Image (tube, grey):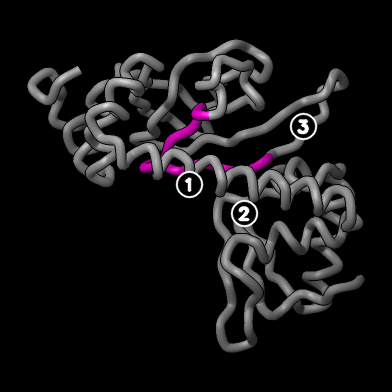
Amino acid sequence: MNASSLSAAHEKLIAALNPGLRVLALRGVLRNYKKNSVIINEGEMGDSLFILLQGAVKVFSTDQNGREITYGDIQAGDYFGELSLDGGPRSASVMTLDACVCSVVSRPALREHLADEPEFALDLVAQVIRRARAATETARNMALLDVYGRVIATLEGHEGPARPDAPVLLTQITHQSIASRVGASREMVSRLLKDLEKGGYIELGVKRITLLKKLPARW
């Protein structure tokens, strides 16, 4: 892909990337994905890195009974799929949360980019480290916290705890999305949130939760 072959809309999306990622995106192939499309399947072999130009995706795993655990969301301007570039299987699945545009960069193209732009290797390593730390934190919470503790960690993990004079608004968040992150049923999460609302700690809305004050450590 080169700049002359891009539409004006795609040029604008790529121009919004940071300079290092912008050059890499031009080495890939642009692909459009509809909402709720699975881009990556856990366990499959992969040799491409995806730069998200528009939209958002979630990273998740499911067990044989269909239960889902969500590791996190990725927003436009970031990339994913880098862990399979060692030739191993995909470690998680990725699904679009809305309509998305990606630049799909093959392993040979990435190697060419690293040869031409060696400083990008440091960015790639830093990305892997950040996501390894996030995965470790998720595993730690699942092992050491009860369901309520995991719900609190999820709510306050976005923007930090609220203060009485500085409420925190969380958008595009649902009871089911929280349940998928904490490994609990939607019904259990809904009960906890309703109790917190009755206690004056949060305010519930449609796909939004407002944290009104710091949430109690125990409930």
- Residue 28 versus residue 53 in the image, above or below: above
Q: Earlier in the sequence, mark 1 or mark 2?
A: 1
Figure quadrant of the C terminus:
bottom right
Residue at 36% of width from left, 42% of height from top? 77
Residue 147 image position (x, y, % from top left): 88, 54
- Label for residue 214? none
Precedes in sequence: disc 3 or disc 1: 3
Q: Is residue 14 left or right of residue 209?
A: left
Q: Provide the residue designation for mark 1.
A: 126
Camera-side residue of 122 and 201: 122
Whichever of callouts 2 and 3 sits on the residue coming sooner in the sequence is 3
The quarter in which the N terminus is drawn is top left
Q: Residue at x 33, y 39 (%)?
A: 120
- What whole-number distance in Å separates the C-alpha atoms at marks 3 and 1? 27 Å
Percent x, y for residue 152? 77, 63
The amino acid type, in three-letter code, at marker 3 is Glu
